[in-house]
Amino acid sequence: MQGNTFLDCAGGVSVVSAADAEGPDARPPGRGDSTGPPSSLSDVVVSGNVLTGTGGLPAIRCTGSPGAPVRRVTITANTVSGTRGSGILLESTEDAVVDANVLSRVGGDGVHVRGGGGLRVSANRISGGAAYGIRVVARTRGLAVTGNGVDSLDAGLSVTGSCQDLVRYGNDLRGSGGLDDASPDPVTDPGDLV
């Protein structure tokens, strides 16, 4: 998904892995094929898009499901503004890069990460956020947060205690509510500006 413009839409870009929520196939014979186990998505690129006014939904959303994460995702060089939801949402996503995006006037979190691992959030510019600049929750593991500039109402970077293997440095959080890092043993350096 590259080079598109979304203006005043009910949502933006959604990448969601399919899951068979019904469990065992209970359909009568001749009523279609079983959807089978959850199927994951991989090698997703969302780049160079302009998303303005995407309503209450995340402007860019990658959502996996148990047993079917979204893998190898690149979200880069997008411009998001005027959304009432989060700018970028990653749920159950693995091996993802969120890099060099510009997010402004976001009603939710600038970048929200829920679960998954092997993630990098770097060189993003987040301004005018109504919530957290970057929020990491729900047992996310293996995350590098580097070189981001954040101006938000709440903490510029918030990481809950259930997250593991966090590396963070070089983030400028001075225009935000500061740093809220409850993760155990993060790898840091004095380059974070709070």
Image (cartoon, rainbow, N blue to C red):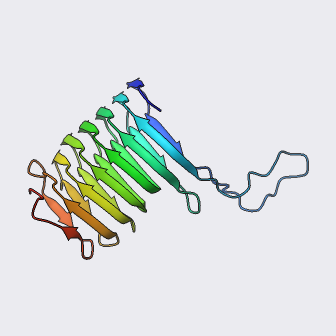
Counting from the top left corner in percent of width and height, residue 97 is at 37, 49
* 83 or 38, nearer to the observer: 38
Name the residue furthest right. 29
Residue sitting at 27 percent across and 76 percent down? 184
Q: Quadrant of residue 4?
A: top left
- In this rendering, does residue 108 appear at all? yes
* 178 or 22, nearer to the observer: 178
* 90 or 28, nearer to the observer: 90
Q: Quadrant of residue 52?
A: top left
Left or right, 74 with respect to 78, comes to right
Left or right, 60 with respect to 147, comes to right
Left or right, 179 with respect to 159, comes to left
Residue sitting at 24 percent across and 76 percent down? 185
Counting from the top left corner in percent of width and height, residue 83 is at 32, 35
Counting from the top left corner in percent of width and height, residue 190 is at 9, 64
> Looking at the picture, does residue 149 appear above or below residue 181?
above
> Looking at the picture, does residue 104 appear above or below residue 62?
above
Name the residue furthest bottom. 185
Q: How many marks?
A: 0
Residue sitting at 43 percent across and 37 percent down? 46
Counting from the top left corner in percent of width and height, residue 121 is at 30, 52
Which quadrant of the figure contains the C terminus?
Answer: bottom left
* 194 or 169, nearer to the observer: 169
Residue sitting at 44 percent across and 56 percent down? 95
- In this rendering, does residue 57 appear at all? no
